Image (cartoon, grey):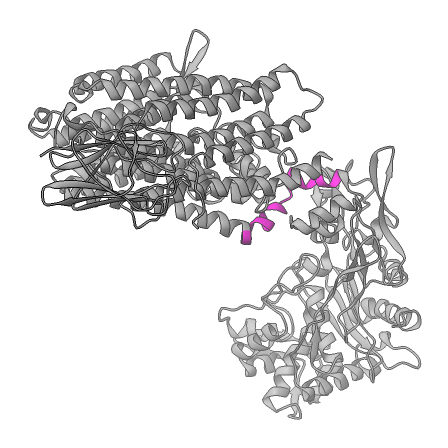
Amino acid sequence: MKERLNSKAPRKLLFLFEILSLSLIFLFSWEGIQTETYAIAVGLVLLIYFSNYMLGRISKGDNYVFLIVCMLVSIGIIMIYRISPDLGLKQLMWLALGIAMFFAAYFAIRYISFWDRLTPLYLVVSYGLFALTLIMGTRTHGAINWISIGGVSVQPAEITKIVLVFLLAAFYGGDEKYRRIKNAEILLMLVIYSFIGLLFLQRDLGAALIFFGIFSGLQYIYTQDRRLIWANLGLAAIGGIAGYILFDHVKVRVTTWLDPWPYINDKGYQITQSLFAISEGGFFGTGLGRGNPAFIPLSYNDFIFSAISEEMGIFTGIGIIMLFMLLVYRGFKIALRQDNQFFRILALGISMVFGIQSFIIIGGVLKVIPLTGLTLPFVSYGGSSVVTSFIALGILQGTSEKRGKAGIGNG
Amino acid sequence: MDSERKRIITILVALCMGFVLLIGYLSYFQMFKAQAVRDNAYNKRLWINEDNILRGSIVDRGGEVLVYSESRDGETQRIYRYDNLYSHVIGYSLKDYGKSGLERRYNSYLVNANENTAINELINLINPSGVGNNLSLTLDHGLQKKTRELMNGKKGSAIAINPKTGEILSMVSLPDFRIETLSENWTSVSENPDSPLLNRGTQGLYTPGSIFKILTAVGVIQEGVPEAIYQCTGSTVIDGYTIRDFDESGHGPLNLEQAFAVSCNTYFADQAVALGHDNLLRIAETLLFNQKIGFDTETNASVFPRESIGLTDLGASGIGQGRVLTTPLNMLMVVSAVANDGYMSMPYLVETVQSPGGMTISSHRSESRKVLEIGESQALKRMMREVVESGTGTNAGINGVKVAGKTGTAENASGNNHAWFVGFAPLEDPKVAVIVLLEEEGASGGRAAAPIAREIIKFALNNITN
Amino acid sequence: MFDLLSIVLKYVFVFIIYLFIFTIIRMIYLDIRSVDYGNLESGAYLKLLNRIDSLPYNLSDSYPVEGELTLGRQKENIIQIKDPYISKKHFRIIKDEEEFFLEDLGSSNGTYLNGERVLDVVRIGKGDIIKVGELEFIFIDGA
């Protein structure tokens, strides 16, 4: 008799996880419990249960990506709340907004079909966002990538990231007329490089890497002229070396990546504190509430992975990596099943964003690659990060349903 | 669509490999690198653990408490009962300036910060001790006090060891410093040009001078020519440079034993040249040169030049001048091996680590290696006896005990010679080996260092029973 | 007290997270194994009328009948449904000459054609509704 496998099982596990960890956190901050705390608990659980249920009702598409993301989000918010109940509450708000945007994006993709015809718009919007950042941007942590609008901080690069995916999808999978322009591919490369260059100027090296990664990946798959792939890699190598020589802040990143220990008190402070945290927890962690995430700078943001590894263990860290792997895998599977090329590329691009971004930041805090200021999607605290990630997820969810004949058939 | 599909899958595989790489590295990091990273002095977590734990005590071989912690109104204080006496060996443990010596090396035992294994954690919860483990040392408090007294006012180091077991019985380095006031006086202590924080015994590098002749003698014995007669005229010219004896009139005809007893420079310089660089290098490295000696506190490697050197330098090496540098500990180990019939028992300070309840958690595993043939060590024993009986080391002689040793007077850049004496007793059944180094003493080893060694040996033989 | 709880729970959390991951992997794996039926141009097929949440995995909208179509709990079935209400081999539809027949394979809870329980073998045609447990299919013959 085969065991009965219930599709409700993951949801129940999620529920159990949330209940237990929330109870633990309550115990931890027994003194300071206010109604807000209960609000978080109830809010989180309800939100996740409800949205999963709704999704099941509404969409015939993929059921897994949202579930995977919910687990990531739960682990993240638990950790964030443990670090700072204030931020935890805020993160819950962002979550709610994010999920709403998720559905919005999903409907937008599902029911609006002319996305693939908007190539010029994407160009304008991208450059516009860059211009906005350069003009209105404020420098935080060495990078100019935030703008303040009426008290709310937004990271335009996060939006441009999504627009980039649309741009590439429209170019490679949309109307043929753009590809037929003379030297279209080379022009595309120049445009992308201009984006990366602007990001360099803003000192947002992490975003630059992601842009490069997405472009290279999609170019590898879709370009007709294979030589351009080598050109791309070659230029990247040259650009990288040039960047290292010309820009001090690049040099600093590389030096502290290779050997941060002599600079333990200044330049290497962040990465060494991250390593201290990761080495402290052992395989199962010190236990929630028993570690010292306060010693890690930006523990709720870029270094959330280190804080999680300290208190919840290496195994949980590995679990998070596996969840991202599953997410990327699922995204690619969705892409492969999609007949419509524009939406296929959209799915690929989004999956690559998740994959590359999480790889870069986890690799960075582990000192496998140099550190860059990126957030871990869904797990890190941050309005821009959470909302844009859910929008991206909504787009992915939208592409997971067949277009059939009703969609724009382009290959 | 087909090639597109293949390429898509390629990218997917690439991304997945990236993730697998991260998982692999994370596991590798945890298994192999995590402990080393954690023990970094800048890791504030180590201090957090500490504040909650009563740091363990350190006792001498007889159980005399040397250092302990006690808690007074919620604050823990560390009491260094003999302050500067153990300032180098035991070291300090300060929030602002880190740790040194045994306090550093055995930190995780002293604060009971074991690995995060499930069992340990549950044990700690069920039976919260809040107390660290204790160290039981090989040092003898009485001998340590005596050694310090004898060396008072000098600059240098004196170490006593049991040559058969490797137990360090006393270890003194001067100048030393007061631990009680170290925090307040950190700047003046750490910037003092005499480097009081340095453990000269294990980390000071000095020109050995004539005590290095022990190694050259090994070479001569190995070549099979100890009986060959050499004419000492008081000076010898090697490659245009003259090496002289203390007594310029010359010693006349000598064989190895005789040359050793009177510490004839020209003999050993010429022998070194005859042996050749490769041979001397081999002997030196067998006797722990050019490598850090494994020990319970930090050590520095003695230096015997690896690259080929000119003949003059080679000759100078033979008499422990030139570019040879050694730590006192290294030369003590050489003599210890001689005393122990060619077997070098590796030195150590910590005999056992014990839990607060008295259970032995860890105990020293002895390690010894053969570095000399029995014939070589026997010959050296005889020669070293001769030094003390009738040679340059008579000041180390004790009535009723056969002491063996070698003196050294090392010329160095400061212009004031280092005074060395290294020896062991009793000859027939060595119980203690000693090295005394008087830095820039400006007097000969026989006159200045040997008497101190004599008193250390006397005390040790009279007071330390095994 | 908190410490003890935190220490015990950390093992529990890891366990839950991995169980979650493996459950999802398993579900995805099963999904891959069920054949994906795309859009059909013509031919006969069984179309699912109601989507129910409690199904172990996505059921496709439609299943073509090519020769024989079986439904049951066992994995040998073309339509595999792991619901205890459904028998190991529940029913099958076969094409004989140009006609289609529905046969109940001795199921415990029965197969219902247009509301009536199928006892043996019965011919079916376009528009017939086949119900097993909570699932409702409509048979469509495109020919």
Q: Quadrant of residue A252?
A: top left
- Residue A152: image location, x then y, percent: 44, 11
Asked whether residue A124 appears in the rendered view, the answer is yes
For the stretch drawn in magenta, the main secondary structure is helix
User: Who is closer to the viewer here, A410 or B149?
Assistant: A410
- Residue A406: image location, x then y, percent: 16, 23
Position of the N terminus of chain B, as image quadrant, is: top left
Q: Is residue B32 magenta?
A: yes
Query: In the rendered view, would you say B304 is above or below B115?
Result: below
In the image: residue B42, left or right of residue A47: right
Residue stretch in magenta: B31-51
Position of the C terminus of chain B, as image quadrant, is: bottom right
In the image: residue A305, left or right of residue C44: right
User: Who is closer to the viewer here, A291 or A345?
Assistant: A345
- Residue A235: image location, x then y, percent: 23, 38
Query: In the rendered view, would you say A88 is above or below B227?
Result: above
Q: Is residue C101 magenta?
A: no
Q: Residue at x 15, y 44 (%)?
A: C95
Query: In the rendered view, would you say A142 is above or below C78?
Result: above
Asked whether residue B191 appears in the rendered view, the answer is no
